[in-house]
Image (cartoon, rainbow, N blue to C red):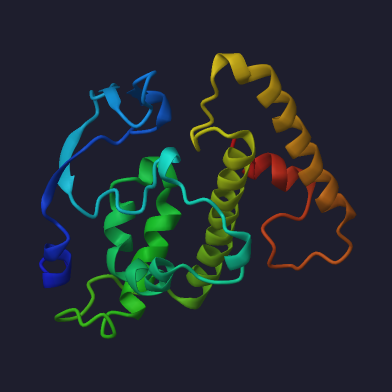
Amino acid sequence: MAEDPRIQAASQPVLYHPDLHKRNIFVSKEDPEIVTAIIDWQSCSIEPAFWYADEVPDFAQPVPDPECADKMEPKSELCPWMSPSFGPMRFAYSTWNFGAVALCEELIQTALHWDELGLAGSCPFLVPNETEIAEHRADYEKFQFVQRLKHSISQALECGTDGWVHADDWETTKSTYREAYKAMVQAILEEEDVDDDEPVKSEADIRELWPF
């Protein structure tokens, strides 16, 4: 797969700053469009161009357009095709952060779509049996839930997905955080018909999967 021309075309080495967010960028007081300094270079590295392609810094997040809420962004239309092609490389180096279940899902999807992706030879990864697939699906549902929850909470708290909060905002953020947790618990407890496939069915499930 790594030798596929499409992967090679997106693998040109690029110097990356993996922690490029607003609190690491300084701008001029007179003109905020002028960057005066960028700090925290200690983790910078030279990586394949696609390595951080799915990570968007907080200062570059798109502003929601109410008039286009029911429409898909043009770049989003490529996501279903891009995922099985680049997914294994995205999660192979980040299992310390996402866990093994995400990588396993990408390997399964790659094996299932091997021919559709036009990859040479046969896939070296064997698709698990039905029992193993069922267990994996349950784990992957939890993984997806945690990622969605983490993204939603970090947006509501205006903090990074690592949970970092400025000291001046700590008390306000802590209060908002607790309210978000209470609202989630209440919503689950008030739900009458919970699907068996849902990853969260009780307060105990929320405590287990709560990301922060």
Tell whether 161 sits left or right of 169.
Answer: left
Query: What residue lies at 56% left-to-right and 55% top-to-bottom?
Result: 64
Q: Position of residue 89 (x, y in %)?
A: 26, 57
174 shown above or below 46: above
> Quarter holding the C terminus?
top right
Report the number of numbered marks.
Answer: 0
Residue 2 appears in the rendering? no
The residue at 39%/61% (across/down) is: 104
Q: Find the residue positioned furthest to the bottom.
A: 115
Picture residue at 41% right of the left edge, 70% below the top? 74
Where in the figure is residue 55, as x and y percent of width and height? 37, 48
The image quadrant that residue 42 belongs to is top left
Most foreground residue, 132 or 55: 55
Question: Is 120 situated left or right of 173 in this image?
Answer: left
Could you tell me which quadrant the N terminus lies in? bottom left
Q: Nearer the viewer, residue 203 or 86?
A: 86
